[in-house]
């Protein structure tokens, strides 16, 4: 099976609600030029569902089972909660290290490695 590649197959225009004249002209032009205007759903890139929807489309196109959007959202929420918990734990560890380390750097190195792991960065 071939690799999934995202394609820009559609041109989407979000008219300004303040500019009814330009919007009407655009609608008339589209109609005059006989452009196909399929019924569709658009998810903007700054929406939290954007990447989830792309994953759903990729799975469908590549013949894999498509996970329910709510299940994906729940998994993402759980992951964010875990990250938040770990970030808080690191903050607490940082305070403890500051209070209990006298010139040793091993604890700080461990803290930095944990932070890098959470942020998916190369190890310092």
Image (cartoon, rainbow, N blue to C red):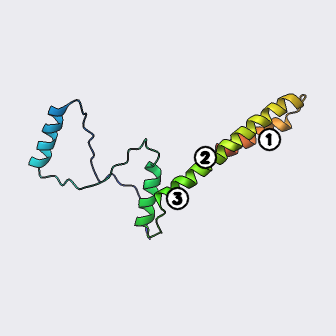
Q: Which residue is mark 1?
A: 110
Q: Residue at x 42, y 65 (%)?
A: 60
Q: Is residue 113 left or right of residue 28?
A: right
Q: Position of residue 76 (x, y in %)?
A: 56, 51
Pointer 3 residue: 71
Please tell me whether mark 1 or mark 2 is closer to you in this view: 2
- Are there few (<14), some (14-19), or many (20+) residues within 10 Å of tag 3? few
The residue that appears at 49% across and 56% down in the rendered structure is 70
Q: Nearer the viewer, residue 34 or 83?
A: 83
Q: Which residue is rendered at x = 86% and y = 28% of the image?
A: 99
> Mark 1: few, some, or many residues within 10 Å (few <14, many ≥20)?
few
Q: Quadrant of the C terminus?
A: top right
1 and 2 marks in contact (CB < 8 Å): no
Mark 1 in CB contact with mark 3 (< 8 angstroms): no
Judged from the image, the secondary structure of the residue bearing numbered disc 1 is helix
Relative placement, left or right, of 50 versus 107 is left
First of labels 1, 3 by sequence position: 3
Identify the secondary structure beneath mark 2: helix
Q: CA distance from mark 3 to mark 2?
A: 14 Å
Residues at discs 3 and 2 in contact (Cβ within 8 Å): no
x then y, percent, for residue 67: 49, 63
Q: CA distance from mark 1 to mark 3?
A: 34 Å
Residue position marked by numbered label 2 in the rendering: 80
Q: Is residue 87 above or below residue 9?
A: above
| SS for callout 3 | helix
Q: In the shown orientation, is residue 26 left or right of residue 96?
A: left
């Amino acid at each position: 099976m071939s690799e999934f590649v995202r394609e820009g197959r559609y041109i989407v225009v979000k008219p300004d609600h303040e500019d009814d004249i330009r919007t009407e002209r655009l609608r008339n032009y589209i109609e005059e030029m006989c452009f196909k205007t399929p019924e569709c759903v658009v998810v903007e890139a700054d929406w939290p569902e954007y990447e989830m929807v792309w994953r759903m489309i990729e799975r469908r196109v590549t013949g894999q089972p498509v996970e329910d959007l709510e299940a994906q959202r729940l998994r993402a929420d759980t992951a964010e909660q875990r990250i938040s918990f770990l970030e808080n734990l690191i903050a607490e560890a940082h305070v403890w290290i500051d209070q209990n380390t006298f010139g040793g750097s091993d604890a700080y190195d461990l803290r930095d490695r944990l932070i890098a792991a959470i942020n998916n960065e190369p190890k310092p």
